[in-house]
Amino acid sequence: MKEFFAKIYRGHQFEFTRVLSSSFDPWYHISVNLNNVDVKYRMHADKDGTWKITMHRLPPLLYSLEGEFNDLIKLNEKPPDPNRFR
């Protein structure tokens, strides 16, 4: 599991930082520069384990990528077993 990683989506570099709160409930701080403006927001897992954006009034691009971010974060939370043969 990585504490920090970056991924490019639709021409923008998104930076993901895993944060562990005092209640041991992880969340991700995500930052991106859109139209020369730094945008920062969080994603938390709901009770079903789906990662969701927790802020309102963000650019529509970010909400359209929520499903892809969910998949990416799930892969980071539970990386493939390196000892398993492909």
Image (cartoon, rainbow, N blue to C red):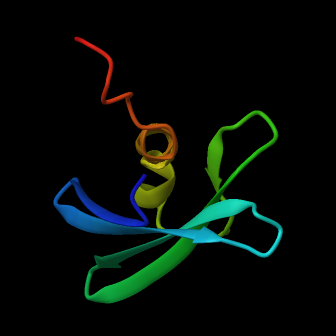
Q: Residue at x 47, y 67 (%)?
A: 59
The image quadrant that residue 71 belongs to is: top left
The image quadrant that residue 17 belongs to is: bottom left
Q: Is residue 86 above or below residue 55?
A: above
Residue 36 position within the rendered picture, expressed as x and y whole percent measured from the top left: 26, 88
Q: Please, which residue is most extreme toward the left here?
A: 11
Q: Residue at x 31, y 63 (%)?
A: 5
Residue 16 position within the rendered picture, expressed as x and y whole percent measured from the top left: 41, 66
Q: Residue at x 62, y 46 (%)?
A: 51
Residue 44 position within the rendered picture, expressed as x and y whole percent measured from the top left: 67, 57
Asked whether, in this view, residue 25 is left or right of residue 50, the answer is right
Q: Is residue 82 above or below residue 12?
A: above
Q: Please, which residue is most extreme toward the front here?
A: 83
Quadrant of the image for the C terminus? Answer: top left
Q: How many numbered marks are there?
A: 0
Q: Is residue 3 above or below residue 39?
A: above
Front position in the image: 82 or 6: 82
Residue 61 position within the rendered picture, expressed as x and y whole percent measured from the top left: 40, 57
Front position in the image: 74 or 34: 74
Front position in the image: 5 or 61: 5
Asked whether, in this view, residue 22 is left or right of residue 16, the answer is right
The image quadrant that residue 43 belongs to is: bottom right
